[in-house]
Image (cartoon, rainbow, N blue to C red):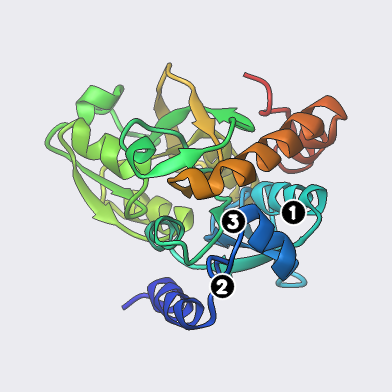
Amino acid sequence: MRKSLVIILALLMVCALAGCGSNSGAGSHLERIKAAGKITVATEGAWAPFTYHDETTNELVGFDVEVAKEIAKRIGVEAEFAEGNFDGGLTGVSQGTFDMMANGVDVTADRQQTFDFTDPYAYDHAVVVAKADNGDIASFDDLAGRTTANSVGSTYAQMGEDHGATVVNVPTLGETMELVENGTADATINANTSVQDYFNTTGNTSLKVVATDEETTNYAIPLKKGEDNDTLREAINKAIADMKADGTLSEISVKYFGSDITKE
């Protein structure tokens, strides 16, 4: 079993016993969070530049990490991060183990059946990455009958399946790239922002973007569905709106992406 899965399962067990998600007691979820003085945030910690560890200090950093900290600050509490795989983070939010998730979670019709989403705070596009000398994959439709590598539970894994690919599930972007590079997978689907960051930081020239989805990906904060989270969603939406208005959100984006992805 992969380390990230072990970590998230352990966190789920510990948090279930300790009430990490601030879901016990009277009042709304927001009131309980304020009483606890913290908001628990699920994140991967292995998906640069959204959420990852600084190579020098090992500190958890990234666009989503700073956005979550700023949201918590504006609500009046501290952000407490719980790291693990993507699918486990979403499961923890849906079960109330974690208060929210900050991990480039895109809004989909399926997820809206399980979660109440905040307003979007960033925008992106999905891309297909294949070997640089590839001559067979030039579109998402060309993935039919081929193998893609993606994080379990991600929208990108679902996109691969929807286009007829067999999906190999791995936890990190780096591993998906390795599988494509060594020929285990024909391609990977991921966020253009993360792919470009990977190319820029690694200098890898053996892979390339072969297709870009025209549809915009909207990133938002998923919360457990229900009226209990209405005031929390409103508070987070206000924080996001204020961060957009005062330039904080744009500043964080430029810091990690070199451009502003917070405007549609």
Percent across and percent down for residue 3 are 42, 77
Q: CA distance from mark 3 to mark 1?
A: 14 Å
**Secondary structure under the numbered disc 3 in the rendered image:** helix
Image point (27%, 51%), residue name: 183
- Looking at numbered disc 3 in the image, what kind of residue is underneath it? His
Left or right position of 50 against 3 = right
Q: Quadrant of residue 111?
A: top left
Q: CA distance from mark 1 to mark 2?
A: 15 Å
- Looking at numbered disc 1 in the image, what kind of residue is underneath it? Ala
Image point (61%, 58%), residue name: 27
Numbered label attached to residue 20: 2
Numbered label attached to residue 29: 3
Image point (47%, 37%), residue name: 106
Quarter in which the C terminus is drawn: top right
Q: Quadrant of residue 238?
A: top right
Q: Can residue 138 be seen from the camera position used here?
A: yes
**Secondary structure under the numbered disc 2 in the rendered image:** loop
What residue would you read off at disc 1? 72
* Badge 3 vs badge 1, beta-carbon distance below 8 Å: no
Which class describes the residues within 10 Å of circle 1: few (<14), some (14-19), or many (20+)?
many
